[in-house]
Structure formats: structure tokens, C-alpha cells
Image (cartoon, helix red, strand yellow):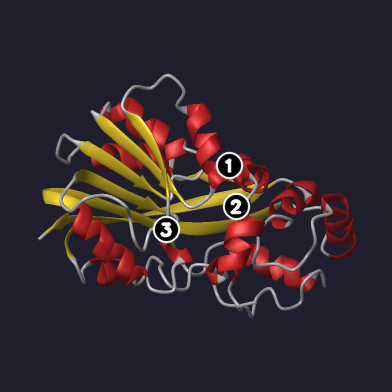
Amino acid sequence: MTANPFLDTDRVRHDLYADAGRIAQRTGALSRAKTAGPHPATVIADLAATGLRGTVLDIGCGRGTTTLALAERLDPPRLIAFDQSTALLAEARSRLTGRLGVEFLRGDFHAIDLPNSSVAVALAAFCLYHSPRPATVIAEIARCLAPGGLSITVTKSPDSYRTLDEVIATSGLDPEATSRPSLYETFHSHNQADIVATCLDVQQVVHHEHRFRFTDADHIAEYAATNPKYQLGGDVAQIARRLRETVGNGPLETTSTVTYVVAARR
């Protein structure tokens, strides 16, 4: 197993995203904790609206939250939801039932099965940190983009949720939580624009600070149990009990920076 679970191909395919329930639990707990910062799907849809009219490609579409926002905001003639996970594509499909012009494509974002110059807007949100070579994915995006086409990539800061790391380590649940590399080590807020610039012309870089407040130990445990950075097991009740015994019942506040890079095909 690699040190970073986001770069472990077997874990990504069979543990992290083979079942939509795990990511739904994590994102649900994080969403309830959020106290500040715009919803990324809304920001992405607004940025994408400045692009060309034509095919929109949502790379790493996951459960389809952003795909739906793109469908509603842009109403493109063709919208492709692209992901490696069959389970997540099925979830996205259920969210977009009845939408005309929506297609679902399973594949590896290092080799996107689309023709050259066939996409007007390509989005890759919260997914390129799963690649050990994200510049290769950017090159694929550039290949797929039509002349004047727009790329939007989105990622997080490498120190995201650092306060949570500290609490998990202090509790003794996972003493190495603060010493492991960031889940976002290959593609994060500090290197994203430089990587995108290897193949595309960067036009805009936007940073938004997001703040979170986990109300109590149960809330923290619900999120932490499904965060692959930690080695905790999946027993939420046991994690919450240990947190209450060692660091108290919360609340816990933490932050993350979400960065958007808008770029165009050269």
C-alpha cells in the first residue's frame, strides 16, 4: 500500500469509490459542518458559463452533484459525466434521470476516450490529486478541448482539515495522523496553476476559504471514519466514544482552501 491512499490504485477502485455510500457519508458530514464558503458546484457552474457553447465534460463526476449544477446552469447540448467508478456513475445517472443530452462515460482520466478538439468546457474538480502525474491529465484535457475551449480545475489546500488531524492524533486513535502526507499532495492549491500552465493558458485563479464546525464527537467520528487519511476502522460509535474520553465532546472547528483555476486551450 502506498503512503497516500489517494494514490493507491487498488484502494481507489475497490475501497474508496466502489460503493457510493462511503463518500456520501463523508460529504454529508462535511456539508453539515460547513459554516462559510460558497458551494463549489455553484462556483464551477458560474465559471463554466463564460465558456463556449458546446460539449461539457465533467471529469471525475463522482455522485453527480456538479454535473447536475452544470446541466441546470448551462443546459449544454451535450454533457458527459466521466468517472472511473461504476457505482458513482450509477449515482450520477440517478440524479440526472430525464435530462436530455447527458451521457455517462467510464474510464481513466489519463486517457480520455474522446476525439481531439471535441469539448467546449472541461471540468476536473476534486479528482486530479488521485493521479501521481496530474500534468498527464491536463495534457488530455488540452487535447480534448476545442480551440478557445475552457478548462476548470478545482482542488484543496494541502493543509486542509489540519485541526482535525491534530485531534485524531491527540486522542490516540491514530497517533500518526499529523505526520502523514496530505491527501492532496500531487495537486493542491499551491501547485495547481503551475501544473495547468504546462499545457493551457491560465486565465484566472480563485481561492475561497471554507470553514467547518463539527458539533460533537459523533459528528467528528462520522466524518473521520470515512476519511482514508486515518487508520481508524469504520466503527463510528467506538471512534466517538474514544474522542469523548480523550479530547472531549467538541465542538471542533477547521478550515480548507478551495482553489479554482480557469484556463484556455492555447
- Read off the residue under disc 1: 31
Q: Nearer the viewer, residue 106 or 3?
A: 106
Q: In the figure, is residue 7 to the left or right of 157?
A: right
Q: CA distance from mark 1 to mark 3?
A: 28 Å
Label 1 sits on a secondary structure element that is helix
Query: Picture coordinates of residue 175 (x, y %)?
Result: 76, 77
Please tell me which of labels 2 and 1 falls first in the chain.
2
Sort mark 2 into few (<14), some (14-19) or many (20+) by Cα contacts within 10 Å.
Answer: some
Marker disc for residue 108: 3
Please tell me which of labels 1 and 3 falls first in the chain.
1
Sort mark 1 into few (<14), some (14-19) or many (20+) by Cα contacts within 10 Å.
Answer: some
Q: Residue at x 20, y 59 (%)?
A: 142
- The amino acid type found where label 3 is placed reads Asp
- Read off the residue under disc 2: 17
The quadrant where residue 25 appears: top right
Query: Picture coordinates of residue 194 (x, y %)?
Result: 26, 72
Proximity of marks 3 and 2: CB atoms separated by less than 8 Å: no
Q: Nearer the viewer, residue 144 or 21?
A: 144
- The amino acid type found where label 1 is placed reads Ser
Query: Picture coordinates of residue 129 (x, y %)?
Result: 45, 65
Label 3 sits on a secondary structure element that is loop
Q: In the figure, is residue 48 to the left or right of 4?
A: left
Q: CA distance from mark 3 to mark 2?
A: 14 Å
The quadrant where residue 2 appears: bottom right
Query: Picture coordinates of residue 188 (x, y %)?
Result: 41, 67
Proximity of marks 2 and 1: CB atoms separated by less than 8 Å: no
In the image, which is nearer the foreground, mark 3 or mark 2?
3
Q: Nearer the viewer, residue 204 or 132?
A: 132
Please tell me which of labels 3 and 2 falls first in the chain.
2
Q: In the figure, is residue 252 to the left or right of 197?
A: right
